[in-house]
Image (cartoon, rainbow, N blue to C red):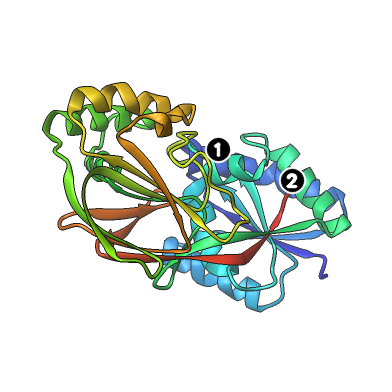
Amino acid sequence: MTSEITLFVNPTAGRGRGAHAAQPAAGALRDAGFSVRTVLGADADDALARARAAVEGGTGALIAVGGDGMVSLALQAVAGTRTPLGVVAVGTGNDFARTVGLPVRDPAAAGRLVAEALKCGRVREFDLGRTGTRWFGTVLASGFDSRVNDRGNRMRWPAGRLKYDLAMIAELAAFRPLPYRITLDDGPAREIEATLVAVGNGSSYGGGMRICPGARLDDGLFDITVVGDCGRATLVKVFPRVYRGTHVEHPRVTVYRAARITLESAGVTGYADGEPLGALPLTAHCVSAAIRVLAP
């Protein structure tokens, strides 16, 4: 393995923590004997092009420094390659890092873990979801949660999670269950009314909301959580339970497992790893061992 390592940095992640986090992470890698270079990029497209060039050039590892959005961008560069991914999680949500068991908001510890894993050859293979050419590591969201994302992204104030809490309250006031058509693997299409459908490669989104609590990153299957037709009062009672993962015990919630799913619903945007994928319909495939991660 080459001793040159690439830090893939989002300087604005976590209200500026990304820029500061790169230094202790790079220091830990250099102390371990690695040569470190940093990739920034003028924008997301430019950053991804530079990350892909580093992977194609034979970098020893691509280390994403930022939040889930930066990890999502890094996945596009390393998925399906032999280049391992490291994560220095300093964003707001950090769901991929939490799922894998990586340090959160401790860049020096994350850098040391990456260095140790590289020296020991400790690399774990995990599944990824794929829709078209886009890869995702945690959850594909659609319905109520994706509409909260839509509204939150349009809001200029406040910042951070409070913005999405307010967006959730606003969406609750007007939300009605949506008609879905869902096809799992080679089975028949199901016509249902649902509040949301979440397709989990990993278990959580939104900074620890365990929407698909039984999802595993190494079983070749999605866990698909369907919150059925329920009124606002029921949703208000059930949704907070998502932080413990106990919402799946509610009679309005159904969990399916499948390697492929097609979601159809008019006027609904799909989000994966917190990033917009586009309007439904979308078909997602669970791809086994699609990525190599430097992890405990």
The outermost residue toward the bottom is 56
- Residue 135 visible in the current orientation: yes
Which amino acid type is shown beneath numbered disc 1? Arg
Q: Position of residue 195 (x, y in %)?
A: 24, 41
Residue at 59% from the left image edge and 43% from the top image edge: 99
Numbered badge on residue 218: none
Task: In this rendered view, identify the residue nearer to me: 55 or 282.
Answer: 282
- Classify residue 88 as left or right of residue 157: right
Q: Position of residue 174 (x, y in %)?
A: 11, 33
Which amino acid type is shown beneath numbered disc 2? Gly
Please, is residue 6 above or below residue 91 in the view? Answer: below
Task: In this rendered view, identify the residue nearer to me: 254 or 104.
Answer: 254
Numbered badge on residue 17: 1
Q: Which residue is mark 2?
A: 111
Quadrant for the C terminus, please: top right
Task: In this rendered view, identify the residue nearer to me: 184 or 115.
Answer: 184
Residue at 75% from the left image edge and 67% from the top image edge: 60
Q: Toward which corner of the image does residue 172 lie, by quadrant?
A: top left
- Classify residue 90 as left or right of residue 134: right
Which of the two marks, 1 or 2, is nearer to us in this view?
A: 2
Quadrant for the N terminus, please: bottom right
Between the residue at mark 1 and the residue at mark 2, the CA separation in whole angstroms equals 15 Å
First in residue order: circle 1 vs circle 2: 1
